[in-house]
Image (cartoon, rainbow, N blue to C red):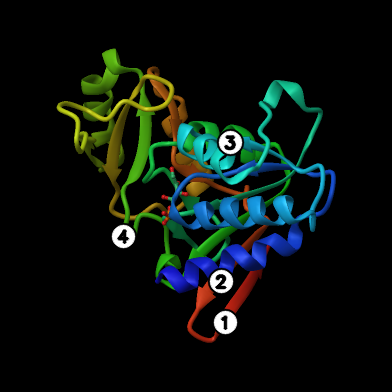
Amino acid sequence: MEELKRMVAKEALKYVDDDMIIGLGTGSTTAYFIQMLGKKLMTGELEDVYGIPTSHQSRLLALESGVPVVSLDEVDAIDIAIDGADEVDQHLNLIKGRGAALTMEKIIEYRAGTFIVLVDESKLVEYLGQKMPVPIEVIPAAWRAIKEELEVFNATAELRMGVKKDGPVITDNGNFILDAKFERIEDPLDMEIELNNIPGVVENGIFADIADIVLVGTKEGVKKLER
Ligand SMILES: O=C(CO)[C@H](O)[C@H](O)COP(=O)(O)O
């Protein structure tokens, strides 16, 4: 599994050129990409590349790996964004947010010229919601009301609890995460919009119609899926 992650991260480096601004996703697969990018910058194979982190995790790792970081309000455009995903359907719609960084990820990836997703083949699904819940970032005061309101969509939601921390997970933005298990998400774009219409929802982990390229790590090599 780690080898497949490394393989797609290496492939993603081929999309990086000098003078680029790159959205840096969150998670274990993107972590390989950030480290490899840092090495290319240190050896001088790449120059004047800046990263825009999507989380504390990617910011700390970028700084540690030698990738200079900037924030969204300091740039005019983002050339590419690189990130992992938890599920990818055949139309390249995604579920993201296992790492609770979905809000900043969507802010950056929506605005990238090209959004490239890195996964291994276990993440490919027939329909969204097949294996994973949809993480929903919510304002803490509204979590219980939203949990109940999600029943309209036949979704069962759980408040995500911390590991090595008592009580709920607190996102980088100071909010809670509800993990909502749906029976089947028939229309990802419609569901993404519906969920964001609930007052108190900050953002949800359905990324419909945003990914341009998905690089899939398989035992036979990297497969490229394109929209
Ligand atoms: O959405 C995410 C974090 O919020 C991650 O990109 C997603 O969970 C994939 O992570 P990994 O590469 O570790 O499997």
Q: Which residue is pictured at 54% across the width and 35% down the height?
A: 59
Residue receiving disc 1: 221
Q: CB of mark 3 within 8 Å of CB of mark 2?
A: no
Q: Is mark 3 within 8 Å of ligand 1?
A: no
Please state which of residues 123 and 192 is positioned toward the viewer in this rendering. 123
Give the alpha-carbon distance from disc 3 to disc 1, as whole Å. 28 Å
Residue 13: tell me if it is visible.
yes
- Give the crowd class for mark 2: few <14, some 14-19, many >=20 residues within 10 Å: many
Q: Point out residue 129 in the picture as x, y percentages from the top left corner.
A: 35, 54
The answer to whether marks 2 and 1 mark residues whose Cβ atoms lie closer than 8 Å is yes
Q: CA distance from mark 2 to mark 1?
A: 8 Å
Task: Give the Cα separation between the discs numbered 3 and 4.
Answer: 27 Å
For numbered disc 3, what is the local secondary structure?
strand
Please rate how many residues cluster around mark 3, counting C-alpha atoms within 10 Å: few if below 14, some from 14 to 19, many from 20. many
At label 4, the amino acid type is Lys
Residue that badge 4 annotates:
131
**Residue 54, quarter of picture:** top right
Q: Which mark is residue 15?
A: none
Kind of residue at disc 1: Gly
Q: Secondary structure at mark 1?
A: strand
Q: Quadrant of the N terminus?
A: bottom left
Q: Nearer the viewer, mark 4 or mark 2?
A: 2
**Considering depth in this image, is 17 or 208 the residue closer to the camera?**
17
Give me the residue at 51% from left, 42% from top: 61
Name the residue tied to disc 3.
53
